[in-house]
Image (spheres, rainbow, N blue to C red):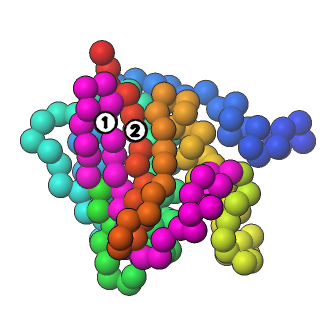
Amino acid sequence: VLYGHATPSEAFQSTVLQIGELDLNLFLKHVAENAPHAGIPAVEYQPTAQVIVVKADEYSLEDVVTHILKNADRYRPEGSAIRIYVELAETTVAVHIHNQGPNIAPDMLDKIFEYGVSDQLDSGAEGHRGQGLFVAQTYMAKMGGTIVARNCDDGVEFVLTLPRPL
């Protein structure tokens, strides 16, 4: 990107991640505790009693979660919490990030992950360039995981699915 040989999207897609085993419980606990320092108050996570290990790159996963939390913070009613919880399966772990607020237009649920998509009218001036969710999807794919957005009765939920070590 700096030398004019790649677009920003190509640069994100060519990033190499350092995937290892990560204690997801501890990771999410730290995310919730430190979110106010990043300007995102009222992020709630109740750790599970068991250790949850996933295959991920810690720094990339932090970037993914931060992008989602910033979006959730922008759309939630003032004073409402962003709730994070996990759902365990045999080979995967799903991280649910839920916020109250308006639903995403049904025809945009998949498109929001495309590079440059932003609903902010003057997105560049506000610092929203439509890169955050594109980066989140790119990093999740590189970690062997997925990310989806879905509408709920009272808001929106993003679900990150990560592989568990075998």
The kind of residue tagged 1 is Val
Q: Residue at x 61, y 46 (%)?
A: 135
The verdict on residue 97 being magenta is: yes
Q: Are marks 1 and 2 in contact (CB under 8 Å)?
A: yes
Q: Secondary structure at mark 2?
A: strand
Q: Residue furthest top?
A: 166
Left or right relative to 73: residue 1 = right
The residue labelled by disc 2 is 161
Q: Which residues are magenta?
A: 85-114
Whole-percent x and y of residue 78?
A: 38, 84
Left or right relative to 142: residue 43 = left
Image quarter of the N terminus: top right
Question: What is the tally of numbered marks visible in this picture?
Answer: 2
Q: Residue at x 26, y 46 (%)?
A: 86
Residue 106: quarter of image: bottom right
Left or right relative to 55: residue 60 = right
Image quarter of the C terminus: top left
Whole-percent x and y of residue 31?
A: 33, 53
The front one of 37 and 17 is 17
Q: What mark, if any, has residue 93 been given in the picture?
A: 1
Q: Is residue 108 above or below residue 114?
A: below
Q: CA distance from mark 1 to mark 2?
A: 6 Å
Q: Say whether residue 156 is visible.
A: yes
